Amino acid sequence: MTINYDMTNEEYHLSPAISSSAVKTVATKSVAHWKYGQRQHKAAFDMGTAVHTLVLEPHNASTVWCGPETRRGKEWKERKAEADESGCILLPEAEYAQARDMAEAVRANKEAAALLGGDLVCEASVFGHDEASGLDLRCRPDGWRKDIDMLVDLKTTIDASPQGFAKQIANFGYHMQDYFYRRVMALEGVEIDRFTFIAVEKELPFSVGVYELDWASLAEGEAAVKAALEQIKSAQTTGNFSTGNEGLQTIQIPRWAFQYTKLAT
């Protein structure tokens, strides 16, 4: 078991230990999708990383660069190569301004700003062996308030309203992430009392919402994680990384598609 405060994001992702993303993939797809899926870098990730840096690590704001208007052309390629070599993030001009506005909106939110104060540790890499599942696990919380045993997770979203962000939580498995992070931290002897999401919209007015999950959502996340860990351990033991789609199956179109017969079961 260990907590590493200096590990880079790239080094963290090289670890073979099971992550929250792996668990969510198994829970929503299959062990095969986790085993054979490739971790890809998408331009959209740069925006999220930039906002995280500007909000959680403002002392590293200089690593977020403003580039040309678009990701095309010689100038972009040259600046991108320079940014990559320097370990920096390059954004097109409009996206750079957007990221700064989103970060400012978070800092201007009284509740969010309070959560980001105190004894806040950002991007600590936590590893531990989980005896219950027999697996090595890892997590990298956005923010860890050591003074009040709280984890803080910053999310970008298209809808920061309670209803809108609740849908995003379900769609992206954030309720699983909540339980999984608590479980990994507990392996290091750190009992997390609260897990709080800060959601910031990607477009004007850059609305910000601060949320914690209710007990029912937490229970669902816990059950999903435990089931996924069992599947991963079983697959590693047997070597059977199944998609779960084997054999002939009878399926039904979604209920909303029944407009003429109303025969949905």
Image (cartoon, grey):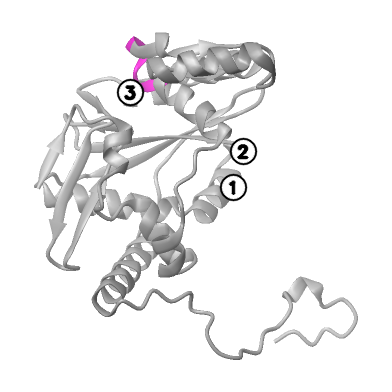
- What's under tag 3, amino acid-wise? Leu
Q: CA distance from mark 3 to mark 1?
A: 24 Å
Q: CA distance from mark 1 to mark 2?
A: 8 Å
Q: Residue at x 41, y 17 (%)?
A: 85
In the displayed structure, does residue 118 sit left or right of residue 110? left
In the displayed structure, does residue 262 sit left or right of residue 249? right
Q: Earlier in the sequence, mark 3 or mark 1?
A: 3
Residue 243 at x, y percent in the picture: 48, 74
Residues drawn in magenta = 55-59
Res 254 → quadrant = bottom right
Observer-nearest of 190 and 127: 127
Which class describes the residues within 10 Å of circle 1: few (<14), some (14-19), or many (20+)? few
Q: Which residue is mark 3?
A: 116
Q: Residue at x 77, y 71 (%)?
A: 256
Q: Is residue 119 above or below residue 210?
A: above
Q: Which residue is mark 1?
A: 163
- What's under tag 1, amino acid-wise? Gln
1 and 2 marks in contact (CB < 8 Å): yes
Which class describes the residues within 10 Å of circle 2: few (<14), some (14-19), or many (20+)? many
Q: Which residue is mark 2?
A: 159
